[in-house]
Image (cartoon, grey):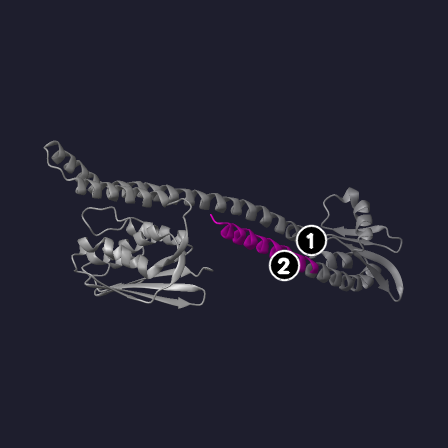
Amino acid sequence: MSLKLQFFLIFSFFLIILSSFVVSGITINKIKYEIKNYSYVLSDALSSALILGSENVEDIIKNIPFGIIITDQNDSIKFFKNFKNYKNLNKIKEKLRKKNQYAEIIYEGFKIGRVYYDEPRSIFYLSILPYVLMIIAIITLIIIIIALRNAQKYEEEKFYSTFAKGLAHQMGNPLSSLIANFELLKRGEYRFHEIENDLNKLSSILKRFSKIGSSINLKPIYLKATILSAYNNLKGKFQNELKLTINGDCLIYGDPELLEWVFENFLKNSYEANSKNIMIEISSEKKLYIVDIIDDGNGMAPSIKDKLFSRNITTKEKGWGIGLILSKRIIEMHKGKVKLIESKKGFTKFRIILVKNSL
């Protein structure tokens, strides 16, 4: 998992936790303010009730949902509600007095008592809610990071499994040819030129595959020359049945051998899709180079379009279909991107995006 993604997840969870503290704080202050105001209203109602008798006081306080203590002019407790531990009422009253959680009961200008009020339980739950959310967020974040890392590990294992299969498949043809030529050599038929070609092919394949997953040697290259080199490597396969047109050019930092391999894959795919013409357009856009690869082949079935770069896709009876997976990997090694723009019968368009480098 990339550092950017980890930073984004941590920052997102931090915002969630911070917002929960802010919202709960605002809500708690609002509840406290409303209870304070309620206590003043209650003290006004109790001013007459205390003179008239206890029944009137009981009627007023019976529906109050939070704890209250009512005292007389000497601050002695006369009534209370919603306190289970009534033996410690004086301690509770003193605690509320220190927190200034009371209102004076005034009757005709004289103080006749106080009404002390406790905070409702909802304030306690609201105050601990951000901490509960924080714990949940941290646990969730850890689980997500572990899951993403496991997923990344699985993808890497899947890629290298595909990589090994692809290497075996790529080496199959020159090895078979080499074995056949050695058999002919035993019979006295000397085909050293063909043996040399097979060895060169094996060397090129091993060299290319050895660069995947390791640091690459970047140097200034012209992309058009790289594409033409890839086309010339496959001329024998195409037998002049695939016409290449290149519009534009650009100078980039890249590994010529790996980029040549990328364009070989696209050229072979176009040829095997019965394309007769393939056009590559190279354009510049701000800090990017855009490389569009367009052919007139059979196109791709809708069922495989979304899976092109994530799994082995091939329409051939033989072959592992790893060309696009490796091409994507190579382009990403060059800090670029590759995607399918459109594919239908007679028109398929891929786009490669490369970042401009300071040359």
Q: Quadrant of residue 40?
A: bottom right
Residue that mark 2 sits on = 23
Q: Residue at x 64, y 53 (%)?
A: 126
Amino acid type, residue under disc 2 in the picture: Val
The reply, left or right, for residue 235 in relation to residue 114 is left
Along the viewing direction, whichever of 107 and 249 lies nearer the viewer: 249
Q: Give the SS element for disc 2.
A: helix
Q: Report the amino acid beneath label 1.
A: Pro
Instruction: Name the dominant secondary structure of the magenta segment.
Output: helix
| Residue shown at the point (74%, 43%) measured from the top left | 85
Q: Is residue 7 magenta?
A: yes
Q: Relative to the observer, which residue lies in front, 19 or 178?
A: 178
Q: Is residue 201 above or below residue 264?
A: above
Residue visible at 88% across and 61% down in the picture: 111
Q: Nearer the viewer, mark 2 or mark 1?
A: 2
Q: Is residue 196 magenta?
A: no
For marks 2 and 1, the one nearer the N-term is 2
Write down the region rendered in magenta.
1-29
Residues at marks 2 and 1, CA–CA distance in whole angstroms: 18 Å
Query: Residue 144: where, in percent of width, then height?
Result: 48, 47
**357 left or right of 231 in image:** right
| Residue 297 x/y as whole percent | 21, 62
Reply above or below: 182 against 241: above
Residue behind mark 1 = 120
Q: Secondary structure at mark 1?
A: loop
Residue at the top extreme? 186
